[in-house]
Amino acid sequence: MRKIAVYPGSFDPITNGHIDIIRRGLGITNKLIVLVSYNPDKSSLFSVEERMEMIQEVIGDDPRIKVDSFSGLLVDYAGKAGASIILRGLRAMSEFEYEFQLALINRRLDRDIETVFLMTGYKWFYTSSKIVKEAASFGGSVKGLVPDIVSRKLQEKYSNKR
Ligand code: ADP
């Protein structure tokens, strides 16, 4: 059976933690859509286009992965894309409550779509876009936490801001 999964997130920017989830997600699906979900009211460091470009560059040319963007109800997007799985990563317990609520509301909105959680790889337990941005904004090195191209883009972004 052909299983399509949507992996939604802000990806502002993509980190090695996200990449680990993408790589492992491919092991349980046939096709993965990495979906840059944006909220026009929420501020972000990188534009949606910049975020998508970075993801595409990092994953390269893989026919099993599509990069897309969306603003709206996730289950609407998933339904149209023929996806039956919403993929999410879990790190700390603090995330659990929010993820629980999100999974339940999405299930209420569309019972044919299941949320599947992958536990973070232990190396990426503390890696989040937020912490990476904080470190980079003060000139700290984030090498090893994000792909090199993302590290360069962060440097560029913050040196322009300084
Ligand atoms: P959101 O704004 O929706 O939280 P993120 O880009 O922060 O978007 O994360 C998207 C998904 O990837 C979420 O399910 C999040 O828990 C997961 N994720 C982020 N960082 C990691 C990590 N280091 N390890 C595992 N999962 C992660």
Image: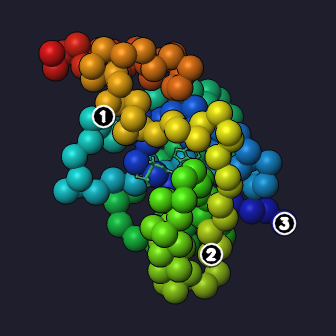
Measure the C-alpha gap from mark 3 to mark 2. Answer: 15 Å
Asked if 1 appears above or below 91 in the picture, the reply is below
Q: Residues within 10 Å of mark 3 (few under 14, many from 20)?
A: few
Query: Which image quarter is the N terminus in?
Result: bottom right
Location of residue 75 with respect to 153 vertically, above or below:
below
Q: Image check: 138 left or right of 143?
A: left
Kindly identify the residue that appears in the image at 45 percent across and 20 percent down: 142
- SS at mark 3? loop
Residue highlighted by disc 1: 46
> Which residue is pictured at 46% across the width and 51% down the height?
9
Residue found at the far right of this picture: 1
* Colour treatment of the image: rainbow
Residue at disc 1, secondary structure: loop
Image location of residue 116, percent across then percent down: 67, 64
Which label sits on residue 13?
none
Q: Which mark is residue 1?
A: 3
Residue closer to the observer: 162 or 138:
138
